[in-house]
Image (cartoon, rainbow, N blue to C red):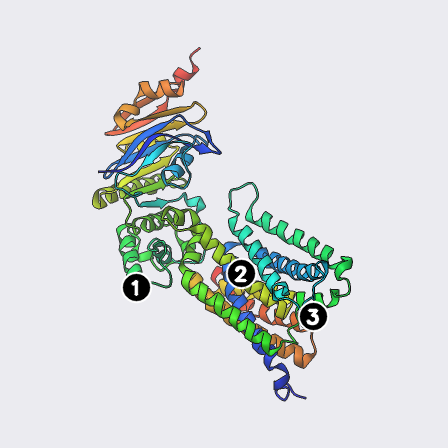
């Protein structure tokens, strides 16, 4: 069966990948400009703890978990993942440079503590039977994206885009010079919180659908590719979204036709877009 | 016109004051130099004046009925030159008002930013990336961003660090020109007393180690007698080609 003959098979997977990759590519530019690359990794782990915690809590309270039809809505793993990611985003947004612990140190702590907590919860006797299902929820698979997940991703990406349309100039100002923004009366903590919250929501949903490796790859590689090419950050945002989507589509095609692992193929395909920027830098230097 | 009054303000962190109480008034059209060695508490005082840090004691009074608008020029070392944007992008940032959401009137903001860049003599560099500007040009771009906010008070934190003599003089002349043209109050924070001795009308000397605060018109504070007494060493204030010069008299230092 050729790639195009299998259109019905890959339609949703490619649609979901395009949406997630474009959204992560855009968000990645903010992440790189703020120099908080590992926020993505930390938020991924923290939202994973949320998912595991929802199963653990269901077991602890003797309530039906997410795999049973009558489970309570408030115990939804996605809701827990979102709440945990937002909590971490709030914590990261409160940390300022110049304090005893740098943003980088706090993010690193967040990542390592969340990773440990995730392992502890997953190895707990209470959810040992559900561990496999939890793992599926933690690290999605780009090959198996359902129409419902595509709709959810589209909704999340639209919400993220709406917040960024409203606050884009504030995000840029505070990322560049928070002190000046404060002297002008901008509520920088609130602005940081909005930025980190969109990172938390966008990254945690994308990881659930694509998996950890491609999600982190789309967060870093397209943004770096775009920033190498442009002189103005404003131009990097649409370019990074485009590179992300193109890398995702090309990677999926290569995975399908050459039988490569999907996530790795997507990251490898995205990294092709690093070449033009690297070449341009070499030409400018010579 | 009074813009800001500090009444017995003690600055510090965690309720611990760093300096004795400070009393001063910032007036439109005047220039104040806050001078002290590194770690003397001058940046803490500045942050308190900018309302970024609450005073430990005393109060800030706003005679206009609102805090004055500050145009802040941070230390150049703090400005990330690798951030990918042009000088014009940098200045446009200063036009963003609190609470204004969405893209706003970008065209009007860019026009105002171009005017500000023209005022500081940088209009020809408006579309160049920040990373390609020299230190002096970058400082002018930051100055343009400060004045595009339509400030009442222009605040410059160590504005000439790392500049050569010509660029330093040019920048201070430009600040003086802006003070006159825009009727601004100027506050310059520096560790370099000789620099502000010819550029400001009032000086506030601060030294956390000596628990020193001395404020007054520059011709009363910057004198040999007062500075020698304050610093406990022979400081000479003289005049050369009509300009004030300040230096430490090593001969007096070496006397037994």
Q: Nearer the viewer, residue B113 or A100?
A: A100
Residue A80 found in image quarter: bottom right
Q: Name the subunit of mark 1.
A: B
Is label 3 or label 1 in front?
3
Where is the C terminus of chain B found, in terms of image quarters?
top left
Location of residue A265 with respect to B185 vertically, above or below: below
Q: Residue A72 at x, y = what percent? A: 64, 66
- Residue drawn at x 49%, y 34% is B14
- The residue that disc 3 covers is A67
- Residue drawn at x 30%, y 52% is B148
Q: Residue B188 at x, y = what percent? A: 33, 37
Q: CA distance from mark 3 to mark 1?
A: 54 Å
Q: Residues within 10 Å of mark 2 (few under 14, many from 20)?
A: many
Q: Nearer the viewer, residue B121 or A260?
A: A260
Which numbered marker is on residue A199? Answer: 2
- In this image, B166 relative to A106: left or right? left
Q: Residue B49 at x, y = what percent? A: 36, 38
Q: Secondary structure at mark 3?
A: loop
């Amino acid at each position: 069966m050729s790639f195009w003959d299998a259109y019905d098979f890959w339609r949703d997977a490619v649609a979901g990948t395009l949406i997630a990759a474009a959204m992560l590519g855009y968000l990645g530019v903010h992440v790189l400009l703020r120099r908080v690359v590992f926020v993505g990794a930390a938020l991924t782990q923290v939202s994973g703890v949320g998912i595991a915690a929802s199963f653990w809590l269901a077991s602890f309270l003797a309530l039906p978990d997410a795999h049973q039809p009558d489970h309570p809505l408030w115990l939804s793993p996605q809701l827990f993942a979102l709440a945990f990611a937002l909590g971490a985003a709030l914590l990261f947004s409160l940390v300022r440079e110049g304090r005893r612990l740098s943003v980088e140190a706090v993010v690193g702590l967040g990542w390592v503590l969340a990773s440990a907590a995730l392992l502890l919860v997953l190895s707990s006797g209470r959810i040992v039977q559900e561990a496999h299902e939890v793992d599926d929820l933690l690290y999605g698979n780009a090959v198996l994206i359902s129409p419902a997940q595509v709709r959810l991703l589209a909704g999340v990406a639209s919400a993220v885009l709406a917040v960024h349309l409203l606050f884009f100039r504030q995000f840029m100002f505070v990322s560049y010079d928070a002190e000046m923004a404060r002297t002008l009366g901008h509520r920088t903590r609130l602005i940081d919180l909005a930025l980190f919250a969109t990172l938390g929501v966008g990254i945690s949903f994308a990881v659930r659908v694509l998996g950890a490796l491609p999600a982190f790859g789309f967060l870093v590689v397209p943004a770096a590719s775009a920033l190498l090419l442009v002189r103005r950050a404003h131009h990097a945002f649409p370019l990074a979204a485009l590179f992300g989507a193109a890398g995702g589509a090309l990677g999926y095609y290569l995975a399908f036709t050459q039988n490569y692992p999907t996530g790795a193929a997507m990251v490898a395909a995205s990294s092709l877009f690093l070449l033009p920027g690297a070449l341009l830098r070499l030409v400018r230097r010579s | 016109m009074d813009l800001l009054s500090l009444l017995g303000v003690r600055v510090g962190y965690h309720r611990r004051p760093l300096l004795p109480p400070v009393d001063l008034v910032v007036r439109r059209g005047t220039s104040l130099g806050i001078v002290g060695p590194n770690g003397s508490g001058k940046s803490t005082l500045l942050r308190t004046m900018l309302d970024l840090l609450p005073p430990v004691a005393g109060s800030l009074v706003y005679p206009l009925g609102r805090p004055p608008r500050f145009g802040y020029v941070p230390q150049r070392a703090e400005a990330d030159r690798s951030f990918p944007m042009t000088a014009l992008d940098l200045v446009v940032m200063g036009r963003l008002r609190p609470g204004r959401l969405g893209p706003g009137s970008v065209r009007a903001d860019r026009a105002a930013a171009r005017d500000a860049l023209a005022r500081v003599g940088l209009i020809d560099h408006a579309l160049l990336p920040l990373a390609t500007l020299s230190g002096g040009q970058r400082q002018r771009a930051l100055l343009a961003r400060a004045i595009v906010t339509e400030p009442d008070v222009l605040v410059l934190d160590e504005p000439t660090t790392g500049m050569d003599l010509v660029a330093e003089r040019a920048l201070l002349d430009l600040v003086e020109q802006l003070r006159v043209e825009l009727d601004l109050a100027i506050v310059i924070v520096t560790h370099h007393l000789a620099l502000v001795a010819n550029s400001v009308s009032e000086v506030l000397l601060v030294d956390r180690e000596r628990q020193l605060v001395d404020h007054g018109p520059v011709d009363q504070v910057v004198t040999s007698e007062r500075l020698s007494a304050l610093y406990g060493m022979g400081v000479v204030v003289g005049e050369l080609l009509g300009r004030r010069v300040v230096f430490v008299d090593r001969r007096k230092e070496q006397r037994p």
